[in-house]
Amino acid sequence: MNQAITTKTLPDWLRAKDLQRLRLLCASVQELWRAMVVGETLLDVP
C-alpha cells in the first residue's frame, strides 16, 4: 500500500482481491479474541 490510510483507502484495500483481505480479517477476529481472554486470565493470576 503506497497511499496513506484514510477512510476511503482502507475499505477499498480490504475489498480488493475479491474480498480476500476482508474475509481473512473477519476470520481472525475469533482467534484474536480467544488469545486476549487467555492472556488476561494468565496476567490475572496472583
Image: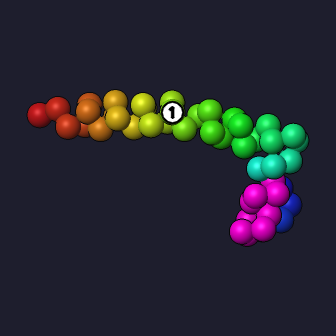
Q: Residue at x 75, y 59 (%)?
A: 10
Rendered position, 35 above or below 18 = above
Q: How many marks?
A: 1
| Residue positioned most to the left | 46
Q: Which residues are magenta?
A: 5-13
Placement of the N terminus among the 4 image quadrants:
bottom right
Q: Residue at x 76, y 41 (%)?
A: 21
Rendered position, 5 above or below 46 = below
Q: Residue at x 34, y 30 (%)?
A: 38
Between 39 and 9, the one lying in front of the other is 9
Placement of the C terminus among the 4 image quadrants:
top left
Between 35 and 14, the one lying in front of the other is 14
State the image quarter where residue 24 is shown.
Answer: top right
Rendered position, 34 above or below 1 = above
Q: Taking 15 as reference, is 31 left or right?
A: left
Q: Taking 23 as reference, is 33 left or right?
A: left
Q: Residue at x 29, y 38 (%)?
A: 40
Q: Taking 21 as reference, is 46 left or right?
A: left
Give the percent coordinates (x, y) of residue 31. Answer: 51, 30
- Secondary element at tag 1: helix
Label 1, on which residue?
30
Between 3 and 33, the one lying in front of the other is 33
